[in-house]
Amino acid sequence: MSLVKFTGTDNLRVRLVLSVLSGKPVRIDGIRSEDKDPGLRDYEVSMLRFLEKITNGTVIEISLTGTSVLLKPGIISGGSPMEVTLRGITSDDHDLSVDLIRTVSLPHLQLIGMSEGLEIPSFGGGEVEFLCPIIKQAKTLNFVAPGKIKRIRGISHAVRVSPQFSHRMIEASRSLLNRFIPDIYLYADVYKGEESGKSPGYALSLLAESTTSAIHCSEAISRPGVTPEEVALEATKALLTEIRRGGCIDRKHQGMVLILMLLGSEDVGRCRMGSSAHGRPIQVLRDIRDVFGTSFKIAPADAESKEVLLSCYGTGYVNSNRPVA
Amino acid sequence: ALSDYRQHARQRRDLVRLIYNSDLTPQQIAHGEAAPNKDKDDADDDDDFFKIKSSADTQVVTISDRTKEPTASLDEWNDEVMLDSIRPLFITGDSTRPVNDLDAEAGVEGDGEE
């Protein structure tokens, strides 16, 4: 099967996932080759090992310097529900925290018919338990009505710092949010002692849910010299920016949703999305085209907004290892 | 209305073309959405060849591998008018007023939907 080649660390994890989903071998060169600490990071190697574990027959070759990786994917096991414990950290400023993955990312999978048994039953102290059910096939995704925001939820957490910080963040966030809707619930999550892990800090994660179950989210985490109020306002303003961008999909989840659309049954999936200032979804579109050969149609959603309507013909992805019930 | 439609059709063609058939970085494309074709030869009915950007202004911007976008300035939300402008997006807001009409206060209604 033909080899797909990429260069650099852009979308590295997405590219590996696309390789496994498509069964096509992928080679990525030039991984931080200019960096003074070149090559794959430990967490990336961990992810490769993870991909190896959940598949049969995967071959991974990493160059001596770690700047090149060749992934020849096997077949995803998929025979029984998955239970994993992931160790490391539960939040940082590059990727979503476990709070948002649990409350925002997982619900997005309902769009393709995955809900029952999909959960993060426990987490904390740098450890996350993840349960994933098996489904036979991904449903065609059709999500074009953004709806109106009906409620806002949030988790204000403080770890190994004054519990008061948590309440200060909630108060600051409400100073901006209260004007919009009454249905706001911000939960103060204070960790103490054993369960709190090693690193002190505080963070505010927010989500806004619409009448059609579109979920937008944001979060901000503490940095040295930044007050709880400043962290809270940063998260809150970022949520407002997200809401204003519109569409049915939070920007941090657009790439994932594009892949879900790709996997849908052999029918046209459609989704309305707000524009991204960052361009990452565009890179995902290109990577999907390079690996799967699937191009999306993209049209302005309407005359007034900058939102776009994306559509694509699903690949009819099927879980071939699912036992017959 | 016809010119609106034309403009529309053009935008559509452009985005698909830019994403799948150009060498522009995703970031350049994303930014271009706000100001398409800022080059001077922005003729109207162009079916022209791709514009080749000189290597000087195609600096390599890495997207890298992170989910969270670097935070842009959020100062705009210190403005009450700005805060008010998104009210229609909430169930409690007045839905007859379109969002983003800050600079078009008067006579916004009566626009056909296509």
Image: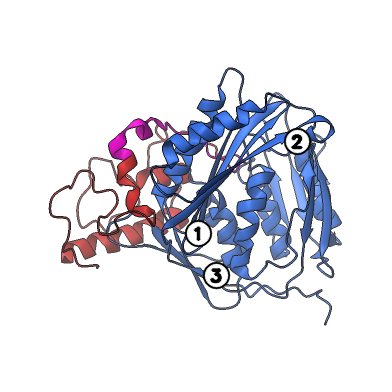
Chain colours: A blue, B red
Q: Is residue A234 left or right of residue B17?
A: right
Callout in the foreground (2, 1): 1
Where's residue A186, x and y in %? 57, 43
SS assignment at label 1:
loop
Range covered by the magenta-colored residues: B63-82
Asked if badge 2 and badge 1 are on a common chain, one would say yes
Furthest residue in direction bottom, as rendered: A325
Q: Chain of mark 3?
A: A
Amino acid type, callout 1: Ala
Find residue A218 and report its image quarter. Answer: top right
As drawn, the residue found furthest toward the top would be A225
Residue that label 3 marks: A141
Q: Main secondary structure of the magenta part?
A: loop
Q: Amino acid at mark 2?
A: Arg
* Residue A24 visible in rendering: no
Q: Quadrant of residue A317?
A: bottom right
Same chain for labels 1 and 3? Say yes or no: yes
Tell me residue A278's x, y (percent).
48, 42
Q: Is residue B72 above or below residue A120?
A: above
Q: Which residue is mark 2?
A: A41
Q: The residue marked by circle 1 belongs to what chain?
A: A
Which residue does the numbered mark 1 point to in the structure image? Answer: A214
Residue at mark 2: chain: A
Instruction: Please tell me whether mark 2 sits on a helix, a strand or a loop.
Output: loop
Label 2 vs 1, first from the N-terminus: 2
Res. A298 image quadrant: bottom left
The residue closer to the viewer here, B114 or B53, is B114
Q: CA distance from mark 1 to mark 3?
A: 13 Å
